[in-house]
Image: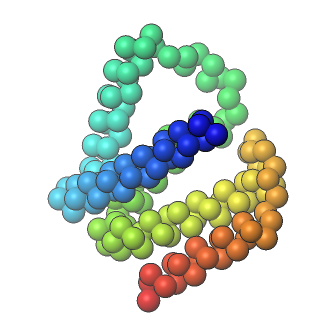
């Protein structure tokens, strides 16, 4: 159970940092543009992870050839995610942009889980999860009003 609380804590810290990062990227987007804010975000993150990997022995990059080709599109997807956040947050506000972003994540996650797509373990979409997704969709509607 202790491990569960640790995982919840890590996820919560990640959520807080996503909100802060998005606000900062929105500020950069307004000042210098979407492409530039994405570049600064990825460049600074790339430099930081390179330093961390060097300090910890270089990591294990040699197994990339064994990965399915679609797994290697994660970086490009990350650029689109970061770009969409940078672009929408200053125009829609954090709450609406994140509500749409998180609801979209839940919908995609539910499909991946339910059908076991792209290597995800099968976790059927039961009534409880379906109601949760419906509540999120209602949340978008309420926030947009």
Quarter containing the C terminus: bottom left
Residue 33 visible in image: no
Give residue 84's quadrant in the image: bottom left
Q: Give the residue furthest to the left.
A: 31
* Residue at position x 70%, y 74% in the image: 131
**Horizontal and vertical percent position of residue 29:** 26, 58
Quarter containing the N terminus: top right
Q: Give the residue furthest to the bottom.
A: 145
54 displayed left or right of 106: left
* Residue at position x 54%, y 46% in the image: 8
18 displayed left or right of 128: left
* Residue at position x 61%, y 41% in the image: 4
3, above or below 84, in the image: above
Give residue 121's quadrant in the image: top right
**Horizontal and vertical percent position of residue 51:** 34, 21
* Residue at position x 44%, y 84% in the image: 144
């Amino acid at each position: 159970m202790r491990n569960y609380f640790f995982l919840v804590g890590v996820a919560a810290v990640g959520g807080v940092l996503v909100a802060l990062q998005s606000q900062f990227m929105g500020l950069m987007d307004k000042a210098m543009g979407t492409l530039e804010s994405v570049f600064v975000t990825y460049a600074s993150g790339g430099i930081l992870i390179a330093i961390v990997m060097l300090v910890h022995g270089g990591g294990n990059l040699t197994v990339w050839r064994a990965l399915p080709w679609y797994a290697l599109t994660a970086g490009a997807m990350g650029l689109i995610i970061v770009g969409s956040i940078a672009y929408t947050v200053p125009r829609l506000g954090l709450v609406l942009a994140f509500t749409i972003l998180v609801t979209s994540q839940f919908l995609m996650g539910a499909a991946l889980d339910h059908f076991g797509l792209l290597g995800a373990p099968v976790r059927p979409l039961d009534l409880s999860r379906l109601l949760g997704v419906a509540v999120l969709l209602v949340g978008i509607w309420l926030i947009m009003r």
